[in-house]
Image (cartoon, grey):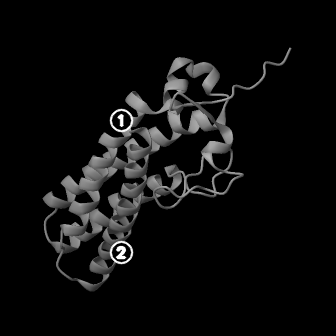
Amino acid sequence: MAAGLIHLHNLMRLIIVVAGVVTVVRAFMGASSGKPYVKTPATVFVASLHVQVILGLVLWFGISGITATFRADPGAAMKVALLRFYGVEHSLLMLAAVVVATIGSARTKRAQGDAAKHKTARLFFTIAMVLLVVGIPWPFRGEGIGRGLFPGMKASAAMSTEAATTTTNGRDEIPWPKPSH
């Protein structure tokens, strides 16, 4: 079940990135051309983000071995890049992106006139996209952090999470750094 949820979380990443890019591009183009604001791309973007947060919280608090290892000893886990990324960095960046996008959606709805809606959407959704791009575990991320672009696809062997973990009883276990005396 954990693998299926991770794959679904990964698939949602692609939907979110596409919806976010469309939303930001439409906001920039609409602001410069004077076209009417269309809320559909932003609605898909923000709704997808909210679904993604629910999936992420289920993984973080429920079934991810990586975050379970992080939660077991956060102090020690902060010294391991993989654990720190999924335990803190990824989670906080994604939550910040969702908050910014949600605020942007609400403020865009309240803005008066299409030009103001485009300008508000451009600001908030661009910030949300920057946070998302920084926090996504792209395949080129080092230290086992990277995930494949598509569900089931692995990052390169040198960068895959599996290269940094071993599996026992279906749970990921992270090798802790050796204590230096």
Answer few, some or many: residues within 10 Å of disc 2's Cα (few below 14, many 20 plus, some between 14 and 19).
some
Q: Which residue is mark 1?
A: 57
Query: Which quadrant does the C terminus fall into?
Result: top right
Circle 2: element type: helix
Instruction: Please report contact status of discs 1 and 2: CB closer than 8 Å, yes or no.
Output: no
Return the residue nearer the eye: 66 or 122: 66
Q: Nearer the viewer, mark 1 or mark 2?
A: 1
| Residue at image coords 54%, 57% | 148
Circle 2 residue: 25
**Residue 127: x percent and y percent?**
41, 57
- Marks counted in the figure total 2
In percent of the image, x 64 and y 21: which residue is there? 76
Query: Quarter of the image holding residue 59?
Result: top left
Q: In terms of sequence position, does the residue under pointer 1 or pointer 2 come before the other?
A: 2
User: Which quadrant of the figure contains the N terminus?
Assistant: top left
Three-letter residue code for mark 2: Val
Q: Nearer the viewer, residue 24 or 82?
A: 82
Q: Is residue 29 above or below residue 95?
A: below
Answer above or below: position of 120 versus 103.
below
Under circle 1, the secondary element is helix
Dot 1 crowding, Cα within 10 Å, few <14, some 14–19, many 20+: few
Q: Quadrant of residue 168?
A: top right
Q: Identity of the amino acid at label 1?
A: Leu
Residue at 52 percent across and 53 percent down: it is: 134
Marks 1 and 2, how far apart in space? 29 Å
